[in-house]
Image: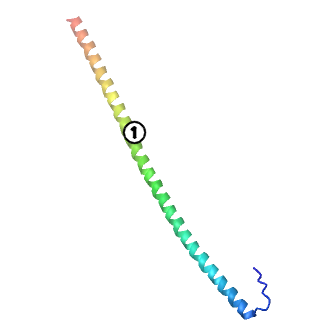
Amino acid sequence: MALDVVGAEVAGLATAAGLAAAGFFAATGFFAAAGFAAGFAAAGLAAGLAAAVLVAGLAAGLALALAAGLAVGLAAALAATGLAAAVFRAGLAAALAGA
C-alpha cells in the first residue's frame, strides 16, 4: 500500500510503516495460530467421532452376525432334529410293519 504523506520525514514514515507491518503480522500470526489450533481440534474431534461411529458400526455388525448365525444354527439344529425324528418314525413304522 503506497502512502502519500506530504511533508512527512522519510525516517518517521519508514518507522510508522514498519510498526504497522509488525503489528499486522503479529495480529495475523496470532489468528493463524488460533485458526490452526481450532482446525487441529476440529480434525481430532472428527477423527474421534469417525472412530466412535466405526466401533459402534462394528459392534452392531458383530451383533447382527451373531444373531444371524444363531438363527441359522437353531434352524439347522431343528431341521436335523426333525429329520432324525422322521427317520426314527419311518424306521419304527417299518419295524412294526415287518413284525
Q: Nearer the viewer, residue 76 or 50?
A: 50
The picture places residue 6, in percent across and down from the top left corner, at 80, 89
Position of 64 with respect to 91 (left or right) is right
Q: Residue at x 34, y 32 (%)?
A: 73
Residue type of the residue flagged with mark 1? Leu
Q: State which quarter of the image contains the N terminus.
A: bottom right
**Image vertical order of residue 96 relative to residue 62, above or below:** above
**Image vertical order of residue 32 relative to residue 77, above or below:** below
Q: Residue at x 28, y 23 (%)?
A: 81
Count residues near mark 1 (Cα–Cα under 10 Å), then give few for <14, some for 14-19, many for 20+. few
Position of 89 with respect to 46 (left or right) is left
Q: Nearer the viewer, residue 67 or 14?
A: 14
Location of residue 74 (image quadrant)? top left
Q: How many marks?
A: 1
The picture places residue 64, in percent across and down from the top left corner, at 39, 39
Residue lying at the far front in this picture: please name it.
7
Q: Residue at x 61, y 75 (%)?
A: 28
The picture places residue 62, in percent across and down from the top left corner, at 39, 43
**Image vertical order of residue 51 relative to residue 87, above or below:** below
Specify how the rendered protein is coloured: rainbow
Q: Read off the residue under disc 1.
A: 64
Q: Residue at x 42, y 51 (%)?
A: 55
**Image vertical order of residue 22 relative to residue 56, above or below:** below
Secondary structure category for the residue under label 1 = helix
Q: State which quarter of the image contains the C terminus.
A: top left
Position of 99 with respect to 8 (left or right) is left
The picture places residue 15, in percent across and down from the top left corner, at 68, 90
